[in-house]
Image: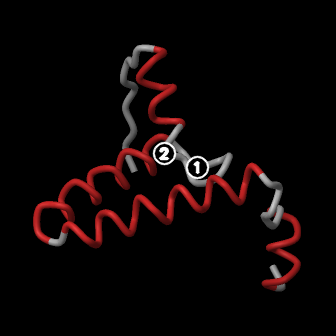
Amino acid sequence: METTTIKLYKDTKTQLDLYREYKNESYDEVIKKMIYIIKTIKTEPWRGKETLKAIELSRERMKRGNFVSDEEASKRLGL
């Protein structure tokens, strides 16, 4: 897959960080998620709101330390 570099102001990056669901989530994933939410809100507003709520809950869980490490996930999945 081809990649590109884009410039962001620091405050834009900070705002994008607010929508990361996990520490290693790439900015590409965050932006794609935001595009999905925007498209969904146009046709199914309730689904967009559900997605935003799920992100908020995920971030709260991370702050509490309630998550599985990559190593633990691999072990559980037998990888």
Return the x and y of residue 73 as percentages of the image width and height.
Answer: 80, 73
Q: On the picture, is 67 further left or further right than 18?
A: right
Q: Secondary structure at mark 2?
A: loop
Mark 2, residue position: 19
Question: Quick one: label 1, few (<14), some, or many (20+) residues within 10 Å?
Answer: few
Mark number displayed over residue 74: none
* Residue type pointed to by label 2: Tyr
Mark 1, residue position: 25
Vertical placement of residue 12 versus 44, above or below: above
Query: Which corner quadrant of the image does residue 37 belong to?
Result: bottom left
Task: First in sequence, mark 2 or 1: give its number.
Answer: 2
Kindly identify the residue that appears in the image at 87 percent across and 65 percent down.
71
Return the x and y of residue 12 as percentages of the image width and height.
Answer: 41, 23
From the viewer's side, name the closer residue of 3 and 47. Answer: 47
Quote the CA–CA distance across marks 2 and 1: 10 Å
Kindly identify the residue that appears in the image at 19 percent across and 61 percent down.
41
Vertical placement of residue 12 versus 42, above or below: above
From the viewer's side, name the closer residue of 3 and 71. Answer: 71
